[in-house]
Image (spheres, coloured by chain):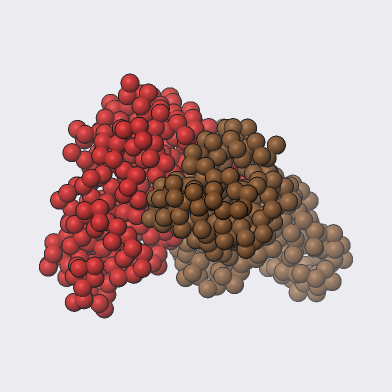
Amino acid sequence: MNLHEYQGKELFAKFGLPVSKNKVITIAEDAINACKDIGGNKWVVKVQVHAGGRGKSGGVKLISSPEDAVDFANQWLGKRMVTYQTDEQGQLVNAILIEEYTDIAQELYLSAVVDRGTQRIVFIGSSEGGVNIEEVAEKTPERIIYEQIDPLTGPLAFQARKISKVLGLNNDQSREFSRMLPQLTDLFISYDLTLLEINPLVITKEGKLHCLDAKINVDSNAIYRQPEIQEMHDPSQEDPRELEAAMNDLSYVSLDGNIGCMVNGAGLAMGTMDTIKYFGGAPANFLDVGGTATQERVSKGFKIILADPEVKVVLVNIFGGIVRCDLIAEGILAAIEEVGVSIPVVVRLEGNSAKKGSSILAESNSEIVSLNDLEEAAKKAVELSK
Amino acid sequence: MSILANKNIRLLVQGFTGSQATLHSEQSIEYGTNIVGGVTPGKGGQTHLNAPVFDSVHDAMESVQPNASIIFVPAAFCKDSILEAADAGIKLIICITEGVPTLDMLIVKKRVDELGIRLIGPNCPGIITPGEAKLGIMPGSIHLPGSIGIISRSGTLTYEAVKQTSDLGLGQSTCVGIGGDPIPGTSFIDVLKLFESDNKTKAIVMVGEIGGTAEEEAGEYIKDNVTKPVISYIAGQTAPAGKRMGHAGAIIAGGKGTAVNKIAKLQDCGVHIAENLLQIGSKTKEVLG
C-alpha cells in the first residue's frame, strides 16, 4: 500500500527526521491560512497523488503569495494528474501539500528497499539526486552505494560513514546522517515498509540535511498489524475495480483487451493471458479467484469482469486441485445465473473430476462452451472476441 | 531415489485441527504419507485424524520424532511456528500459508540458514514425491512416478506442468513448489542442486514468473553446475509494466525481472525454453529425445 508524501512526512517527523514545516489542504481557500501559519514569504505547493514524476507534469510549484496557492489548488483539486509513472487516466488530486520554501544547495538520493537478492533491507544512496537517478544507476554505477542492513545488528555507524562518503557529505553532515540512518531503519521496520525513498534528500544553503520528498510503500501482508497505516489508506488512488476485487479477496488488474479472464492461481492466470496473446487475442484483465474457486468467488469475479464494457467473451480456466471440478462447474452455472451473464463464456476445467465437470456444463441450457484442453479453449475465446 | 521427501517421512502438521490443515492432511494420509501427529496449542492430548495432537513441536518431538513439519497456521503466526519447529530440531519445514509479512521472513530466513534447515515456502503448494509422500496441497491424482524434477514459484501453474509430463508418460521424480513470495525459504538454485545429484531425475522443469531475479540467478548456476537438461517456462510475458512509485525498485532490478530478460538470460545459459505453457510437456519430451 502506498502513502501520500504528506503522510510519509508525518512519519518522518515522528521519527525525528528533518522535514519542512507544512500544511495539507483539501479546500482551495484554506491555502491562505495555511501559508500564514507556515510563515515566510515563499512556499512550495505540491499535488498529493500516489505517483512520482509530479514536478515534470506541473504538480509542484514555487509561489510567493498565498493567493497563488489558492489558484494552484483551484487548478488541481478534483482533477486527475497524469505522469510518466501513472496510467493514461492518471491519479485523482484530493489534497495539496503546502511547505515552507527550502533554499537548496545540492540534491542527493536516498532510499531503502527489501532486496530479494540479498534478502536484507538495503539502503541506496547517491550524490546525484533528482529525477534522473535511474540513468545514473545505469551509466555511472560507481556513484551509487548499496549498503545492506544486518537484521541482527541494525545499521552501524561505519555504514552511515560509508554512505556519507558516496553522498559527498562534510563532517558535520556525516554526523547528522549517522543519527538519521538508525531513525530511517526504525521507521522502516516499525511500519513494515517495503520502500522508503527520499528523492531528493537535500543539503540546504545553511549546510543542513533535509528530506524534501517522501515515498513510502507498506507491505500489504503486514497491514493487519499497522493500525496507523490503515487510517492512511486512500482508496481514491486505486482503480475502482481493483479496489472492489481486493475487498472481495480477489486479485484483479485491468488491461486493454476484450477477453475477460478468470483463473485460479496467479501464475496460471499470467500463463492464460500469455496463451490468449499467443493465439492472437488480447486479455481484458488479470483475475486470480484463488485456489478454491467457490460459487461466491466466481460470482464476484464475473461481476468485476463484466463491469468492463470492452469485454466480449469470458475465458474461465480452472485447474481443480483438491476441489472437484464438478463442484466448480455447478458453482460457475449458479454464478452465471446469479449475475446474468449475457456474453459467451468459454470454460476450461482440468484436474480433479474434470470430465464430470465439463459434462455438467455441456448438459446445462446455458451458452457455455466447455473444453478440457487449454489450447482449444484459448483459440475459441480468441475467435469469439473478434 | 528422489529429493527432500520419500516413504521415510514422519510428518508433523502445525495448525493441525484447523479446517485447511484437516482437509489437506486427510488427502496426504490417503496418498500414503505418514503423518505422525500435529500441533495445536491448547489441544494437546486430543486425537485428530487418528493421530495425536500436541501443545508444542517440542512435545511432539519427544513422543513421535517427526523429521518434517508442514505449517498451516494463519500468516500472523507463521514466524513463530517456523522458528518453533526450527528450535525443536526439525530439519525440513514446509510453510503453506500465504500472506506472511516480508520483514518476518527476513528474520526467519536468516535464522533457518544459520541452523542449516531446509524451509520450503511460504505461500507454496509444498512437495510431492509421486507414489511415496505428499507434503502439500497439490492434487495427488495428476502425478505419476517418473524422471522429471519440477521446481516452480507458482501453484496451479505447477499442476499444468505436472499434468503434461504425466500425460506424456514421463512422470515426476519430485515436485517442489518454492512459492512466489519476495523472500522464499528455498531458491531455484537450492533445488537445482538437489535434482542434479539425484539419480532418478533425468531432466528438470523450472517454472518461473516475472518479478525478482531468481530465474536469472538460476540460469547462471545452471550454466556452470547443472549437467542435466533444464526446460523452463516463464509466466507473465504479456503482463503490463504496471504503475510504480519511485525509482528504488527499478534501480535494484537493473533491467532484470521482465519475461524478455529472463528468457534471454536462460537461453544464454543453455536452458531450453517452452515458449508457451502448453508446450512444457512436449518440449521436455523433445529434449529427452
The residue at 26%/33% (across/down) is B147
Can residue A382 be seen here? The reply is yes
Q: Position of residue B151 (x, y in %)?
A: 35, 41
The residue at 49%/38% (across/down) is A373
Rendered hue of chain B is red
Kindly indicate the quadrant of the structure image that contains residue A274.
top right
Kindly indicate the quadrant of the structure image that contains residue B54.
bottom left
Q: Is residue A78 left or right of residue B81?
A: right
The residue at 30%/36% (across/down) is B171
Q: Position of residue B92 (x, y in %)?
A: 23, 53
Q: Residue placed farthest to the bottom in the image?
A: B42
Q: Nearer the viewer, residue B152 or B213?
A: B152
Would you place residue A317 above or below residue A4 in this image? above
Query: In what quadrant of the picture does the C terminus of chain A appear?
Result: top right
Q: Residue placed farthest to the top in the image?
A: B289
Query: In what quadrant of the picture does the N terminus of chain A appear?
Result: bottom right
Q: Position of residue A362 (x, y in %)?
A: 54, 48
Q: Position of residue A241 (x, y in %)?
A: 65, 58
Would you place residue A272 above or below residue A302 in this image? above
Q: Is residue A181 left or right of residue A45?
A: left
The residue at 36%/40% (across/down) is B162
Would you place residue B26 above or below residue B286 in this image? below
Q: Nearer the viewer, residue A5 or A354?
A: A354
Rendered hue of chain A is brown
Can residue A213 be seen here? The reply is no
